[in-house]
Image (cartoon, grey):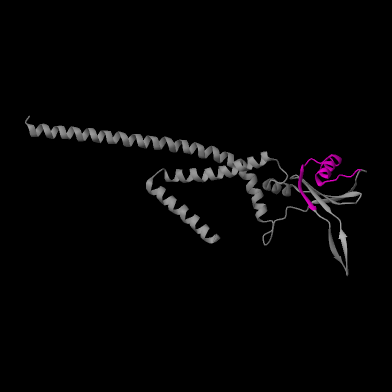
Amino acid sequence: MNAPENLAADSAVTTHVLLDETGRRDRRARSRRATFIKWLRKVHGWVGLWGAALGLLFGTTGFLLNHRAGPLRISTGEPDVSTLQVPLPQHAPETPRELAKWLKQQLQLRAAPGRVQKEPAHRVAWGDRTALQPERWQITFATPRESTLAEYWVGNGYVSIKRNDNTFLAMLTNLHKGTGLSIGWVLLADTLAGGIVLLSLTGVLLWTELNRRKTIGAVLVIGSIVAAVCAGLM
């Protein structure tokens, strides 16, 4: 075999080796992509299962909240309202917080004191005269099932109590809003919000299959939606 033939053979072997190396790299890249997409499908499925469990509750209550007013109002029922006058002890509480603590023990309320309002004494018009209206305290105790409002005018010997017992549907909407619930429930609801975001991201990635053209298209579509929303809010 002469020199030109040797050079041609060596060149062919080198080209073949380069092609084989390129093919191996492509196969490894495809294998890594396939492994990642398989893992992504598992994450998407498990997050979707968790989201389905909570989504059924929050979807139903969100629908009711969306229709809490006209024109397509859906009523959750009227609460059962009751009132009570509670006499104060001889040494009346001196602050709203002390009153809240005393009422919780006296009425055996399950809810912790929530919003506390303190309206200072001020003068009000009464016909052609003015009168001094005493200081007023308002304390709210709320759970998803019921809410209790305590109102006290400083100097009175009693506290006015108004209690609302909610219907089952109203209780569900209160769960959605987190009314009278602990931080544990708030964090649980946050997991659903995070799950929805994660489902959106993994869903887009699964649709693109990490294909460059699909990925660019998804970015353009999402960017257009975000830009349209921002433009509408301006």
Judge from the rendering whether residue 215 lies leftward or rightward of residue 133; answer left or right: left
Q: Percent from the top left, x then y, of residue 178?
A: 69, 45
Q: Quadrant of the N terminus?
A: top left
Q: Percent from the top left, x then y, of residue 197?
A: 54, 45
Confirm whether the magenta stretch covers residue 111. Answer: yes
* Vertical arrangement, residue 4 with respect to residue 232, above or below: above
- Residue furthest top in the image: 1
**Total tally of numbered discs in the picture:** 0
Q: Residue at the location (72% across, 55% down)?
A: 75
* Nearer to us in this view, 31 or 88: 88
Q: Residue at the location (68% across, 48% down)?
A: 177
- Residue furthest left in the image: 2
Which segment did they paint magenta?
A: 91-118
Q: Residue at the location (45% across, 36% down)?
A: 38
Q: Percent from the top left, x then y, of residue 172?
A: 70, 46
* Nearer to us in this view, 47 or 191: 191
Confirm whether the magenta stretch covers residue 131. Answer: no
* Vertical arrangement, residue 231 with respect to residue 214, above or below: below
